[in-house]
Amino acid sequence: MEVNWLIIWDFIPQLMKGAQVTVHITVVGLLGGVVLGAIAGLMRAYGNTVINAIAFVYIEVIRGTPIVVQVMFLYFALPVLASIRIDPMTTAVLAIVINAGAYIAEIVRGAVLSISKGLTEAGLAIGLPRWKVIRYIVGPLAFRRLIPPLGNQFIVSLKDTSLFIVIGVGELTRTGQEIMAANFRAVENWTAVAVMYLIMTGVLSLMLRMIEKRMRIL
Amino acid sequence: MTDAIIQFRNVSKHFGPLKVLDEVDLDIHKGEVVVLIGPSGSGKSTLLRCINGWEQITGGDLIINGMSVLGGNKVLREIRQEAGMVFQQFNLFPQMTALQNVAFGPQEVRGLSRKEARDLARELLAKVGLAEKADHEPSELSGGQQQRVAIARALAIKPKVMLFDEPTSALDPELKQEVLNVMRTLAAEGMTMVVVTHEMGFAKQVGTRLIFMEHGKIAVDGHPREVIDTPPNDRMKDFLQHV
Protein backbone atom coordinates (compact mmCIF):
# COMPACT_ATOMS: atom_id res chain seq x y z
CA MET A 1 0.00 0.00 0.00
CA GLU A 2 1.39 3.39 -0.96
CA VAL A 3 1.58 6.12 1.62
CA ASN A 4 -1.07 8.69 0.91
CA TRP A 5 -0.97 11.61 3.34
CA LEU A 6 -4.16 13.14 2.00
CA ILE A 7 -6.13 10.26 3.46
CA ILE A 8 -5.51 11.73 6.90
CA TRP A 9 -8.16 14.37 6.17
CA ASP A 10 -10.76 11.64 5.99
CA PHE A 11 -10.32 10.50 9.53
CA ILE A 12 -9.27 13.76 11.16
CA PRO A 13 -12.80 14.52 12.51
CA GLN A 14 -12.86 11.12 14.21
CA LEU A 15 -9.40 11.68 15.74
CA MET A 16 -10.48 15.10 16.96
CA LYS A 17 -13.29 13.46 18.90
CA GLY A 18 -10.77 11.11 20.48
CA ALA A 19 -8.49 14.04 21.30
CA GLN A 20 -11.42 15.76 22.98
CA VAL A 21 -11.87 12.78 25.26
CA THR A 22 -8.15 12.82 26.02
CA VAL A 23 -8.28 16.50 26.92
CA HIS A 24 -11.35 15.97 29.05
CA ILE A 25 -9.78 13.13 31.08
CA THR A 26 -6.53 15.09 31.44
CA VAL A 27 -8.08 18.37 32.57
CA VAL A 28 -10.58 16.90 35.05
CA GLY A 29 -8.08 14.31 36.26
CA LEU A 30 -5.34 16.86 36.82
CA LEU A 31 -7.66 19.29 38.60
CA GLY A 32 -8.44 16.51 41.06
CA GLY A 33 -4.80 15.41 41.10
CA VAL A 34 -3.60 18.88 42.05
CA VAL A 35 -6.09 19.08 44.93
CA LEU A 36 -5.28 15.58 46.17
CA GLY A 37 -1.55 16.13 45.66
CA ALA A 38 -1.59 19.44 47.53
CA ILE A 39 -3.38 17.83 50.47
CA ALA A 40 -1.11 14.76 50.56
CA GLY A 41 2.00 16.91 50.06
CA LEU A 42 1.08 19.24 52.92
CA MET A 43 0.27 16.22 55.08
CA ARG A 44 3.80 14.98 54.40
CA ALA A 45 5.41 18.36 55.04
CA TYR A 46 3.47 19.48 58.11
CA GLY A 47 1.52 16.53 59.47
CA ASN A 48 2.20 14.67 62.69
CA THR A 49 3.44 11.08 62.57
CA VAL A 50 0.05 9.51 61.83
CA ILE A 51 -1.02 11.99 59.16
CA ASN A 52 2.41 11.82 57.61
CA ALA A 53 2.31 8.01 57.52
CA ILE A 54 -1.10 7.95 55.79
CA ALA A 55 0.16 10.23 53.01
CA PHE A 56 3.42 8.31 52.80
CA VAL A 57 1.67 4.96 52.28
CA TYR A 58 -0.61 6.43 49.59
CA ILE A 59 2.33 7.95 47.71
CA GLU A 60 4.50 4.85 47.90
CA VAL A 61 1.73 2.46 46.84
CA ILE A 62 0.84 4.56 43.79
CA ARG A 63 4.41 5.36 42.79
CA GLY A 64 5.40 1.78 43.25
CA THR A 65 2.78 0.26 40.92
CA PRO A 66 2.23 0.76 37.18
CA ILE A 67 -0.68 2.96 36.19
CA VAL A 68 -2.10 0.16 34.01
CA VAL A 69 -2.34 -2.07 37.06
CA GLN A 70 -4.03 0.75 38.95
CA VAL A 71 -6.59 1.14 36.19
CA MET A 72 -7.23 -2.61 36.09
CA PHE A 73 -7.66 -2.60 39.83
CA LEU A 74 -10.16 0.27 39.77
CA TYR A 75 -12.13 -1.18 36.89
CA PHE A 76 -12.07 -4.93 37.53
CA ALA A 77 -11.04 -5.52 41.16
CA LEU A 78 -12.99 -2.79 42.90
CA PRO A 79 -16.39 -4.13 41.80
CA VAL A 80 -15.47 -7.50 43.31
CA LEU A 81 -14.04 -6.09 46.52
CA ALA A 82 -16.56 -3.39 47.29
CA SER A 83 -19.29 -3.89 44.69
CA ILE A 84 -18.57 -0.44 43.35
CA ARG A 85 -19.08 -0.45 39.60
CA ILE A 86 -17.81 2.59 37.71
CA ASP A 87 -17.95 3.28 33.99
CA PRO A 88 -14.72 3.40 31.95
CA MET A 89 -14.67 7.20 31.66
CA THR A 90 -15.02 7.76 35.40
CA THR A 91 -12.39 5.10 36.00
CA ALA A 92 -10.01 6.91 33.67
CA VAL A 93 -10.50 10.27 35.38
CA LEU A 94 -10.18 8.67 38.80
CA ALA A 95 -6.99 6.88 37.77
CA ILE A 96 -5.39 10.17 36.70
CA VAL A 97 -6.51 11.87 39.93
CA ILE A 98 -5.03 9.14 42.12
CA ASN A 99 -1.90 8.60 40.05
CA ALA A 100 -1.01 12.25 39.39
CA GLY A 101 -1.95 13.08 42.99
CA ALA A 102 0.83 10.87 44.33
CA TYR A 103 3.49 12.45 42.16
CA ILE A 104 2.18 15.97 42.72
CA ALA A 105 2.26 15.31 46.48
CA GLU A 106 6.00 14.74 46.27
CA ILE A 107 6.40 17.86 44.11
CA VAL A 108 4.46 19.92 46.67
CA ARG A 109 6.40 18.46 49.59
CA GLY A 110 9.70 19.19 47.86
CA ALA A 111 8.72 22.76 47.01
CA VAL A 112 7.54 23.48 50.55
CA LEU A 113 10.65 21.99 52.14
CA SER A 114 12.91 23.88 49.75
CA ILE A 115 11.77 27.15 51.31
CA SER A 116 14.24 28.09 54.01
CA LYS A 117 13.16 27.19 57.54
CA GLY A 118 14.36 30.61 58.58
CA LEU A 119 11.43 32.23 56.80
CA THR A 120 8.94 30.12 58.74
CA GLU A 121 10.74 31.09 61.95
CA ALA A 122 10.71 34.75 60.95
CA GLY A 123 6.97 34.55 60.30
CA LEU A 124 6.27 32.81 63.60
CA ALA A 125 8.62 35.25 65.34
CA ILE A 126 6.36 38.20 64.58
CA GLY A 127 3.51 36.27 66.18
CA LEU A 128 1.80 34.91 63.07
CA PRO A 129 -0.16 31.68 63.48
CA ARG A 130 1.28 28.79 61.48
CA TRP A 131 -1.50 28.74 58.89
CA LYS A 132 -0.82 32.37 58.02
CA VAL A 133 2.87 31.62 57.63
CA ILE A 134 1.98 28.84 55.19
CA ARG A 135 -0.70 30.87 53.42
CA TYR A 136 1.16 34.16 52.99
CA ILE A 137 4.88 33.41 53.21
CA VAL A 138 5.88 29.81 52.45
CA GLY A 139 2.94 29.10 50.10
CA PRO A 140 3.55 31.83 47.51
CA LEU A 141 7.28 31.07 47.44
CA ALA A 142 6.79 27.32 47.15
CA PHE A 143 4.20 27.84 44.41
CA ARG A 144 6.76 29.41 42.11
CA ARG A 145 9.09 26.47 42.53
CA LEU A 146 6.19 24.13 41.91
CA ILE A 147 5.53 25.24 38.34
CA PRO A 148 8.39 23.57 36.42
CA PRO A 149 8.04 20.05 37.94
CA LEU A 150 4.26 20.37 37.88
CA GLY A 151 4.39 21.06 34.14
CA ASN A 152 6.41 17.92 33.71
CA GLN A 153 3.78 15.89 35.57
CA PHE A 154 0.96 17.42 33.50
CA ILE A 155 2.62 16.24 30.32
CA VAL A 156 3.25 12.77 31.71
CA SER A 157 -0.39 12.48 32.83
CA LEU A 158 -1.68 13.64 29.47
CA LYS A 159 0.27 10.89 27.76
CA ASP A 160 -0.76 8.35 30.40
CA THR A 161 -4.36 8.72 29.22
CA SER A 162 -3.37 6.60 26.20
CA LEU A 163 -3.23 3.63 28.57
CA PHE A 164 -6.97 3.74 29.07
CA ILE A 165 -7.16 1.85 25.81
CA VAL A 166 -7.11 -1.21 28.10
CA ILE A 167 -10.57 -0.43 29.47
CA GLY A 168 -11.95 0.75 26.18
CA VAL A 169 -12.17 4.48 26.75
CA GLY A 170 -12.52 6.21 23.39
CA GLU A 171 -9.59 8.55 23.78
CA LEU A 172 -7.13 9.47 21.06
CA THR A 173 -4.99 6.31 20.99
CA ARG A 174 -8.01 4.04 21.06
CA THR A 175 -9.63 6.05 18.27
CA GLY A 176 -6.42 5.70 16.27
CA GLN A 177 -6.53 1.96 16.74
CA GLU A 178 -10.14 1.77 15.59
CA ILE A 179 -9.37 3.71 12.43
CA MET A 180 -6.31 1.56 11.89
CA ALA A 181 -8.42 -1.61 12.14
CA ALA A 182 -10.73 -0.27 9.46
CA ASN A 183 -8.30 1.03 6.83
CA PHE A 184 -4.87 -0.42 7.68
CA ARG A 185 -3.24 2.96 7.02
CA ALA A 186 -0.59 2.49 9.74
CA VAL A 187 1.85 5.21 8.66
CA GLU A 188 -0.70 7.94 8.06
CA ASN A 189 -2.81 7.04 11.07
CA TRP A 190 -0.11 6.77 13.71
CA THR A 191 1.66 9.85 12.36
CA ALA A 192 -1.56 11.81 12.72
CA VAL A 193 -2.10 10.49 16.24
CA ALA A 194 1.47 11.34 17.25
CA VAL A 195 1.18 14.87 15.83
CA MET A 196 -2.05 15.43 17.74
CA TYR A 197 -0.38 14.39 21.01
CA LEU A 198 2.50 16.70 20.16
CA ILE A 199 0.12 19.60 19.60
CA MET A 200 -1.57 18.98 22.96
CA THR A 201 1.66 18.64 24.93
CA GLY A 202 3.08 21.59 23.00
CA VAL A 203 0.21 23.84 23.99
CA LEU A 204 0.59 22.67 27.59
CA SER A 205 4.33 23.41 27.57
CA LEU A 206 3.74 26.82 26.07
CA MET A 207 1.16 27.71 28.71
CA LEU A 208 3.45 26.62 31.50
CA ARG A 209 6.36 28.56 30.06
CA MET A 210 4.21 31.67 29.96
CA ILE A 211 3.19 31.22 33.60
CA GLU A 212 6.82 30.68 34.52
CA LYS A 213 7.88 33.84 32.74
CA ARG A 214 5.27 35.90 34.53
CA MET A 215 6.40 34.63 37.90
CA ARG A 216 9.93 35.14 39.02
CA ILE A 217 11.33 32.15 40.83
CA LEU A 218 12.66 33.36 44.17
CA MET B 1 7.73 39.31 93.15
CA THR B 2 10.13 41.27 91.00
CA ASP B 3 9.61 43.54 88.03
CA ALA B 4 11.70 41.17 85.91
CA ILE B 5 10.32 40.96 82.39
CA ILE B 6 12.15 37.68 81.72
CA GLN B 7 12.44 35.13 84.50
CA PHE B 8 14.39 31.90 84.10
CA ARG B 9 13.42 29.59 86.95
CA ASN B 10 15.71 26.61 87.16
CA VAL B 11 15.55 26.18 83.38
CA SER B 12 17.09 23.11 81.79
CA LYS B 13 17.20 22.09 78.17
CA HIS B 14 18.20 18.67 76.94
CA PHE B 15 18.81 17.55 73.40
CA GLY B 16 18.54 13.81 73.97
CA PRO B 17 21.21 12.99 76.52
CA LEU B 18 22.97 16.30 75.95
CA LYS B 19 22.33 18.94 78.59
CA VAL B 20 22.54 22.33 76.87
CA LEU B 21 21.08 24.41 79.67
CA ASP B 22 21.70 23.28 83.21
CA GLU B 23 19.25 24.67 85.78
CA VAL B 24 19.65 28.30 84.81
CA ASP B 25 18.23 31.04 87.05
CA LEU B 26 18.19 34.48 85.55
CA ASP B 27 16.12 37.64 85.90
CA ILE B 28 16.22 40.28 83.20
CA HIS B 29 14.66 43.62 84.05
CA LYS B 30 13.10 46.34 81.96
CA GLY B 31 15.66 48.51 80.22
CA GLU B 32 18.57 46.11 80.63
CA VAL B 33 20.83 45.40 77.68
CA VAL B 34 22.11 41.90 78.37
CA VAL B 35 24.98 40.65 76.25
CA LEU B 36 25.40 36.87 76.12
CA ILE B 37 28.80 35.51 75.22
CA GLY B 38 30.50 32.14 75.46
CA PRO B 39 32.23 29.48 73.42
CA SER B 40 30.16 27.62 70.84
CA GLY B 41 28.09 24.92 72.50
CA SER B 42 27.99 26.83 75.76
CA GLY B 43 24.23 27.29 75.49
CA LYS B 44 24.06 31.03 74.83
CA SER B 45 22.00 30.77 71.64
CA THR B 46 19.79 28.11 73.20
CA LEU B 47 19.20 30.36 76.19
CA LEU B 48 18.07 33.12 73.83
CA ARG B 49 15.99 30.79 71.68
CA CYS B 50 14.13 29.42 74.71
CA ILE B 51 12.79 32.88 75.47
CA ASN B 52 10.32 32.88 72.61
CA GLY B 53 9.89 29.17 72.39
CA TRP B 54 12.12 28.17 69.46
CA GLU B 55 13.61 25.67 71.81
CA GLN B 56 11.26 24.03 74.24
CA ILE B 57 12.59 23.95 77.76
CA THR B 58 12.73 20.51 79.32
CA GLY B 59 12.89 21.56 82.95
CA GLY B 60 11.97 24.48 85.19
CA ASP B 61 9.89 27.44 84.03
CA LEU B 62 10.49 30.50 81.94
CA ILE B 63 8.20 33.49 82.29
CA ILE B 64 8.08 36.36 79.82
CA ASN B 65 6.08 39.41 80.81
CA GLY B 66 3.98 37.23 83.11
CA MET B 67 3.41 34.42 80.59
CA SER B 68 4.99 30.99 80.79
CA VAL B 69 6.56 29.51 77.66
CA LEU B 70 4.90 26.27 78.75
CA GLY B 71 1.44 27.80 78.27
CA GLY B 72 0.80 26.26 74.86
CA ASN B 73 0.67 27.58 71.31
CA LYS B 74 -1.63 30.51 71.91
CA VAL B 75 0.40 31.86 74.79
CA LEU B 76 3.58 31.27 72.82
CA ARG B 77 2.22 33.43 70.04
CA GLU B 78 1.53 36.20 72.53
CA ILE B 79 5.01 35.84 73.94
CA ARG B 80 6.41 36.19 70.44
CA GLN B 81 4.53 39.44 70.05
CA GLU B 82 6.18 40.71 73.22
CA ALA B 83 9.66 39.44 72.36
CA GLY B 84 10.81 40.47 68.88
CA MET B 85 13.52 38.38 67.33
CA VAL B 86 16.33 39.28 64.97
CA PHE B 87 18.15 36.39 63.30
CA GLN B 88 21.69 35.95 62.09
CA GLN B 89 20.44 35.27 58.55
CA PHE B 90 17.98 38.25 58.40
CA ASN B 91 15.23 35.99 56.97
CA LEU B 92 13.36 38.77 55.18
CA PHE B 93 10.36 37.62 53.15
CA PRO B 94 11.84 37.67 49.62
CA GLN B 95 8.55 38.19 47.79
CA MET B 96 7.84 41.43 49.65
CA THR B 97 9.41 44.88 49.52
CA ALA B 98 11.17 46.29 52.57
CA LEU B 99 8.00 48.21 53.41
CA GLN B 100 5.77 45.17 53.06
CA ASN B 101 8.12 43.12 55.22
CA VAL B 102 7.74 45.63 58.04
CA ALA B 103 4.02 46.32 57.52
CA PHE B 104 2.99 42.65 57.35
CA GLY B 105 3.26 41.92 61.09
CA PRO B 106 1.29 44.91 62.37
CA GLN B 107 -1.43 44.31 59.81
CA GLU B 108 -1.79 40.55 60.30
CA VAL B 109 -0.93 40.28 63.98
CA ARG B 110 -1.86 43.58 65.57
CA GLY B 111 -4.88 44.17 63.36
CA LEU B 112 -3.83 47.59 62.04
CA SER B 113 -5.43 48.81 58.82
CA ARG B 114 -3.35 48.62 55.67
CA LYS B 115 -2.70 52.35 55.78
CA GLU B 116 -1.83 52.44 59.49
CA ALA B 117 0.53 49.50 59.00
CA ARG B 118 2.25 51.17 56.06
CA ASP B 119 2.60 54.46 57.91
CA LEU B 120 4.13 52.65 60.87
CA ALA B 121 6.44 50.74 58.52
CA ARG B 122 7.61 53.97 56.88
CA GLU B 123 8.29 55.49 60.25
CA LEU B 124 10.32 52.47 61.36
CA LEU B 125 12.28 52.27 58.12
CA ALA B 126 13.17 55.93 58.58
CA LYS B 127 14.29 55.12 62.10
CA VAL B 128 16.72 52.48 60.83
CA GLY B 129 17.86 54.88 58.10
CA LEU B 130 16.23 53.13 55.17
CA ALA B 131 13.30 55.40 54.29
CA GLU B 132 14.47 55.64 50.70
CA LYS B 133 14.70 51.83 50.35
CA ALA B 134 11.05 51.22 51.26
CA ASP B 135 10.07 49.91 47.85
CA HIS B 136 13.17 47.79 47.28
CA GLU B 137 13.08 44.04 47.54
CA PRO B 138 15.44 42.23 49.92
CA SER B 139 17.59 40.97 47.04
CA GLU B 140 18.34 44.59 46.13
CA LEU B 141 19.64 45.42 49.61
CA SER B 142 23.03 44.83 51.20
CA GLY B 143 23.30 42.49 54.17
CA GLY B 144 23.50 45.39 56.57
CA GLN B 145 20.43 47.00 55.06
CA GLN B 146 18.54 43.69 55.15
CA GLN B 147 19.36 43.28 58.82
CA ARG B 148 18.15 46.81 59.55
CA VAL B 149 14.86 46.03 57.77
CA ALA B 150 14.65 42.86 59.89
CA ILE B 151 15.05 44.98 63.03
CA ALA B 152 12.32 47.34 61.82
CA ARG B 153 10.10 44.32 61.12
CA ALA B 154 10.60 43.03 64.65
CA LEU B 155 9.95 46.49 66.13
CA ALA B 156 6.75 46.88 64.13
CA ILE B 157 4.82 44.52 66.38
CA LYS B 158 5.77 46.74 69.34
CA PRO B 159 7.61 44.18 71.42
CA LYS B 160 8.64 44.85 74.99
CA VAL B 161 11.90 42.96 74.56
CA MET B 162 14.18 42.54 71.56
CA LEU B 163 16.19 39.37 71.13
CA PHE B 164 19.21 39.38 68.85
CA ASP B 165 20.80 36.09 67.77
CA GLU B 166 24.26 37.00 66.46
CA PRO B 167 22.82 39.84 64.39
CA THR B 168 26.14 40.85 62.82
CA SER B 169 27.84 37.46 62.42
CA ALA B 170 26.79 37.08 58.78
CA LEU B 171 27.92 40.59 57.83
CA ASP B 172 31.12 41.96 56.37
CA PRO B 173 33.07 44.04 58.89
CA GLU B 174 32.20 47.35 57.22
CA LEU B 175 28.48 46.53 57.37
CA LYS B 176 28.42 45.51 61.02
CA GLN B 177 28.58 49.09 62.28
CA GLU B 178 25.36 50.26 60.63
CA VAL B 179 23.48 47.45 62.36
CA LEU B 180 25.21 48.02 65.69
CA ASN B 181 24.35 51.73 65.43
CA VAL B 182 20.66 50.94 65.11
CA MET B 183 20.95 48.66 68.15
CA ARG B 184 22.71 51.47 70.02
CA THR B 185 19.82 53.82 69.28
CA LEU B 186 17.34 51.24 70.52
CA ALA B 187 19.27 50.74 73.74
CA ALA B 188 19.43 54.50 74.27
CA GLU B 189 15.64 54.64 73.97
CA GLY B 190 15.38 52.20 76.85
CA MET B 191 14.47 49.03 74.93
CA THR B 192 15.10 45.86 76.88
CA MET B 193 17.52 43.78 74.82
CA VAL B 194 19.14 40.36 74.99
CA VAL B 195 21.98 40.05 72.52
CA VAL B 196 24.12 37.06 71.61
CA THR B 197 27.20 38.54 69.96
CA HIS B 198 30.95 38.43 69.61
CA GLU B 199 31.21 42.23 69.38
CA MET B 200 33.06 43.08 72.58
CA GLY B 201 33.18 46.79 71.67
CA PHE B 202 29.40 46.85 71.50
CA ALA B 203 29.13 44.87 74.75
CA LYS B 204 31.30 47.39 76.56
CA GLN B 205 29.69 50.51 75.15
CA VAL B 206 26.05 49.54 75.08
CA GLY B 207 25.62 46.54 77.37
CA THR B 208 24.43 47.08 80.91
CA ARG B 209 25.12 43.47 81.82
CA LEU B 210 27.33 40.76 80.49
CA ILE B 211 26.77 37.04 80.87
CA PHE B 212 29.45 34.51 80.06
CA MET B 213 28.05 31.02 79.53
CA GLU B 214 29.91 27.79 79.89
CA HIS B 215 28.61 24.20 79.77
CA GLY B 216 25.00 25.35 79.95
CA LYS B 217 25.51 27.41 83.07
CA ILE B 218 25.98 31.10 83.72
CA ALA B 219 29.66 31.30 84.63
CA VAL B 220 30.01 35.07 84.89
CA ASP B 221 27.33 37.72 85.33
CA GLY B 222 28.52 41.28 85.74
CA HIS B 223 29.02 44.73 84.35
CA PRO B 224 30.46 44.46 80.82
CA ARG B 225 33.34 46.88 81.21
CA GLU B 226 34.46 45.36 84.50
CA VAL B 227 34.25 41.71 83.55
CA ILE B 228 35.75 42.22 80.08
CA ASP B 229 38.68 44.24 81.37
CA THR B 230 39.33 41.94 84.33
CA PRO B 231 37.79 38.54 83.62
CA PRO B 232 36.91 36.84 86.88
CA ASN B 233 37.89 33.38 85.67
CA ASP B 234 40.50 31.82 83.41
CA ARG B 235 38.03 30.27 80.98
CA MET B 236 36.53 33.66 80.22
CA LYS B 237 39.98 35.22 79.96
CA ASP B 238 40.94 32.51 77.51
CA PHE B 239 37.71 33.01 75.56
CA LEU B 240 38.16 36.78 75.29
CA GLN B 241 41.65 36.35 73.88
CA HIS B 242 40.19 34.38 71.02
CA VAL B 243 37.33 36.71 70.07
Image: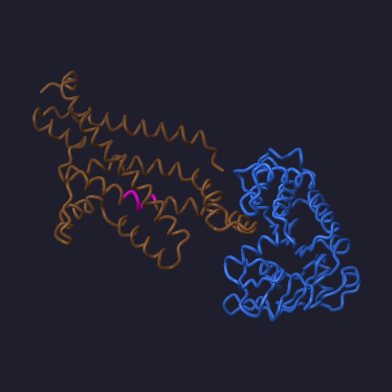
Chain colours: A brown, B blue
Q: Quadrant of residue B25 in the image?
A: bottom right
Q: Quadrant of the C terminus of chain B?
A: bottom right
Q: Residue furthest left?
A: A182
Residue, x 73% and y 54% (percent of image)?
Answer: B155
Which residues, given as a range, are shown in magenta?
A: A99-104
Which percent across, then down, holds residue B19?
A: 64, 78
Residue A4 figure quarter: top left
The residue under the point 15% across, 35% down is A177
Question: Relative to A162, is B161 above or below?
Answer: below
Determine the image quadrant of residue B202. bottom right
The answer to whether A13 is drawn above or below residue A201 in the figure is above
Q: Position of residue B130 (x, y in %)?
A: 77, 43
**Above or below, B32 relative to B97:** below
Please state, as top left, top right, bottom left or bottom right, where the N terminus of chain B lies in the image: bottom right
Q: Is residue A81 left or right of residue B197?
A: left
* Residue B148: image location, x then y, percent: 75, 49
Asked if residue B160 lies left or right of residue A16, the reply is right
Question: Which sits in the foreground, A46 or A150?
Answer: A46
Looking at the image, residue A86 lies above or below residue A214: below
> Residue B3 colored magenta?
no
Q: Nearer the viewer, residue B173 or A80?
A: A80
Q: How many marks?
A: 0
Q: Main SS type for the magenta part?
A: helix
- How far from the left and from the top, in percent, is residue A191? 22, 28
